Amino acid sequence: MTAISSATVDTDEPPPFPMPRRWPLDPPPALAELRRRGQPLTRVRLWDGSTAWLVTRHAQIREVLHSPAFSSDTSSPGFPKATRAAAALAGDATRWLVRLDPPEHTRIRRILAKEFAPRRVAAMRPIVQCAADTLIERLAEAPPEPDGAVDLVRELALPMPATVICRILGVPNEDREFFQDRTHVAMSADASPYEVRAAFADLRDYLDRLLREKENDPADDLLGRLIVDQLRPGELTHEELLTIARLLLIAGHDTTANMVGLIGLSLARHPDQAELLRENPQLIPGAVEELLRYHSVGNHGLSRIATADVRIGGQLVRAGEGVLLALNSGNRDEAAFERPDVLDLSRGASAHLTFGAGIHRCLGAPLALLELEVVLAGLLERLPGLRLAVPLEQLSFRHDMLTYGVRALPVRW
């Protein structure tokens, strides 16, 4: 990891956030510098001139995520927005599940929890396996570009989780390109507030029409079951169901798609570790956890606001002050993981923070783990000679997106 001068983080003026990366596969080096200097909380300056506390250590991030003294409600005055896109999302009138606090959050999450219970997710394996097998086989047989390469992101990473979430939710697969495009704009840190709001409005209008059709004739899919079991008895309103559908559609494919691309990149760069997994397939679940830890696709982490005075890591955080949780820093914390900057697919890293923690831990984590395990196993078996077709330095990474990843991955095998 490239070092930076202490002046970058040791000034009277709070350093700007987000902080730039120096190497595409590592978090910003300023975060490691803050950890080394024993500063679990540091004041940072945001794009709009406001300041917030930045939390960089694993233990303190978990402490905030488990503490009832912090709120996820972005409408709270002073709630920190790390980027203009985040501010535009916060301005959306919809009450997202990830923005709710108890007891409202508890009610909605309890309704959804049964859909992502272990038995229900296990029943989704045939859908996931079919999508992965079909796309990996198609990838293996895809005609190469003139330079002899095939783009793993285009052929596998983007379509695979989108195909799965369409099947699970009951969204027509032929609409995949539409919602992928709208999600791309909505998740862009460089998009204007107008563009972000327009993208979310387009998704809302699309899902509103889809749900009204389903309400007349619900099928046996996730949205259909929510209509029959929750909407009709009055446990959910149409607007609440619409919000849930939009969250599941976006979260159900964007983060997983980017992780699939990064998994392909990791296998191509570490053929020795890929061979280890082929010889020891029982290591695959732990390898997925390690890949999630190492890559930390949430580019800017999570945000919270204190609702009461509370001490975190010895630092007093007063009610009304914003807190930013650098999950990628916590996942590289030397106090939590041995040799954290090394990708070691033989270790279990289930204590990673990529799915969050506490009451807002990612509801779809079991499905994401299933998808990634199936994809990893499929790539190991079908493309044993996977390698990069261009130098790493020529790859384009999603520095401008809320979800980190690689835009294209030219590979050979």
Image (tube, rainbow, N blue to C red):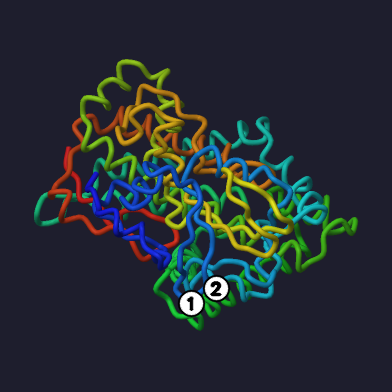
Q: Residue furthest right?
A: 233
Disc 1 crowd rating (10 Å Cα; few below 14, some 14-19, many 20+) is few
Quadrant containing the C terminus is top left
Residue, disc 2:
87
Q: Nearer the viewer, residue 327 or 280?
A: 327
- Could you tell whether 378 is left or right of 130 in the image? left
**Identity of the amino acid at label 1?**
Asp
- Quadrant in which residue 81 is drawn: bottom right
Quadrant containing the N terminus is top left
- Could you tell whether 395 is left or right of 348 in the image? left
* Eye-nearest disc, 1 or 2: 1
Question: Residue 152: x and y, percent?
Answer: 28, 48
Question: Residue 265: x and y, percent?
Answer: 27, 43
Q: Residue visible at 67% across and 58% down? A: 306
Disc 2 crowd rating (10 Å Cα; few below 14, some 14-19, many 20+) is some
In the rendered structure, are the residues bearing label 1 and label 2 in contact, judged by CB atoms less than 8 Å apart?
yes
Nearer the N terminus, badge 1 or badge 2?
1
Mark seen at residue 48? 1
Question: Residue 400: x and y, percent?
Answer: 36, 66
**Identity of the amino acid at label 2?**
Ala
- Rendered view: 60 above or below 153: above
Q: Nearer the viewer, residue 126 or 274?
A: 274
Q: Residue furthest bottom?
A: 194
- Rendered view: 35 above or below 171: above
Q: Residue visible at 72% across and 51% down? A: 69
Q: Nearer the viewer, residue 154 or 251?
A: 251
Determine whether the residue tagged by mark 2 lies in a helix, strand or loop. Answer: helix
Query: Is residue 363 at least partly visible in the picture?
Result: no
